[in-house]
Image (cartoon, rainbow, N blue to C red):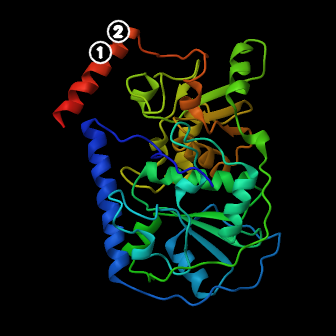
């Protein structure tokens, strides 16, 4: 049995972040409302198998997906919302979903609360992907809520996991379920249970950065190979002013550069910027070149977006994701940059205690 995950990233507390959180909540509620008002039952999805030579774009628009559904293409649409909303009473998937979509909660591919970024074992993923009917010939479409940049990270993390499993025909639905519903496209409430596939998963773990590997690179920085540590978190995390609840220490990896994942997106949306703008941002940040780039965040969620942009949209090949990120690093004895002093930590703990009493 795979562990249920903690929230992908911690809730925000600043006014700016509070606005984003409310926007995300409003979007989730709007999606649920739209999906419950327009019931639709899709026809079955059998289709001709794709050839190995066929490729798909990493981003698919709602209009293109609708056309594929109408053609009865060989699709596996993965609705990555959790089965229930935060109140534990209101359903997500059962209230309505894209025709033919199956429930594939994001938490299914995450680690336990104390290490949310942990990558599941090959055996765990084999069982899960068989249950979802994943096969190499199918076109896999990942459907997030579409609320904001952080929400996109869940789709990117699943994309990365599928990619490491050798499953290459994968797309993320642009704008997610929100964009689909906003166009008035059909939805259904019937549960879809695909026939189990016979896939066997063996992850390419050479593409996964580990704590020990990064520690070795840092120790040999002056004489070893060229590399860049890219911190995808907001600036206050990078500066050690905030941290993930599962991290015992704040700060960032030694020598890391801050490249906030939200820079890749159109303002206050889950839609990525045009390719030329993405490339300009990446070049200015030093993320394009011959050096290896290791992207990280708190739990490998936000940084999955950076990996996705660099590899799938900009064609970079020397990019690794550090899935366990600072939650794992901060539990080791390895040094951190921007780690607050003991006095600052105690001051923050006191402030947090006072804030909790006021609630």
In the image, residue 121 lies at what x, y percent? 72, 48
Along the line of sight, which residue is nearer the eye, 191 or 284? 191
At which x and y percent is residue 126? Answer: 74, 59
Q: Residue at x 78, y 13 (%)?
A: 223
Residue ID at (72%, 30%) = 291
Q: Which residue is mark 1?
A: 347
228 to the left or right of 273: right
Q: Quadrant of residue 237?
A: top left
Which residue corresponds to mark 2? 343
Contact between marks 1 and 2 (CB within 8 A): the answer is yes
Tally of numbered discs: 2
Where on the picture, by quarter, is residue 324? Answer: top right
The label shown at residue 90 is none
- Dot 2: what SS? helix
In the displayed structure, 69 sits above or below 142; it is below
Helix, strand or loop for disc 1: helix
């Amino acid at each position: 049995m795979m562990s249920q995950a903690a929230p992908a990233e911690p809730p925000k507390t600043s006014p700016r972040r509070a606005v984003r959180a409310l926007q995300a909540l409003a979007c989730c509620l709007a999606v649920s409302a739209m999906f419950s008002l327009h019931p639709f039952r899709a026809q079955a999805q059998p289709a001709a198998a794709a050839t190995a030579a066929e490729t798909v774009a990493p981003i698919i628009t709602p209009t293109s997906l609708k056309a594929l559904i109408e053609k009865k293409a060989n699709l596996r649409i993965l609705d990555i919302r959790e089965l229930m909303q935060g109140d534990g009473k209101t359903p997500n998937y059962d209230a309505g979903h894209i025709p033919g979509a199956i429930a594939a909660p994001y938490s299914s591919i995450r680690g336990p609360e104390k290490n949310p970024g942990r990558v599941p074992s090959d055996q765990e993923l084999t069982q899960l992907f068989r249950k979802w009917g994943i096969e190499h010939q199918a076109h896999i479409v990942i459907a997030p809520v579409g609320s904001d940049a952080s929400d996109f990270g869940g789709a990117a993390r699943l994309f990365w996991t599928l990619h490491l499993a050798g499953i290459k025909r994968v797309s993320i639905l642009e704008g997610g379920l929100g964009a689909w519903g906003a166009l008035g496209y059909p939805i259904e409430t019937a549960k879809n249970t695909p026939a189990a596939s016979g896939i066997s998963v063996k992850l390419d773990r050479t593409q996964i950065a580990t704590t020990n590997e990064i520690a070795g690179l840092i120790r040999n920085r002056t004489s070893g190979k060229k590399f860049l540590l890219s911190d995808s978190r907001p600036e206050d995390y990078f500066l050690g002013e905030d941290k993930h609840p599962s991290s015992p220490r704040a700060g960032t990896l030694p020598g890391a550069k801050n490249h906030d994942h939200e820079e890749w997106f159109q303002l206050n949306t889950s839609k990525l910027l045009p390719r030329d703008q993405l490339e300009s941002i990446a070049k200015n940040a030093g993320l394009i070149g011959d050096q290896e780039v290791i992207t990280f965040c708190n739990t490998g969620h936000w940084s999955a977006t950076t990996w996705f942009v660099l590899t799938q949209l900009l064609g970079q090949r020397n990019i690794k994701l550090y899935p366990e990120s600072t939650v794992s690093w901060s539990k080791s004895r390895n040094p951190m940059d921007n780690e607050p002093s003991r006095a600052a930590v105690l001051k923050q703990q006191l402030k947090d205690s006072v804030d909790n009493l006021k609630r």
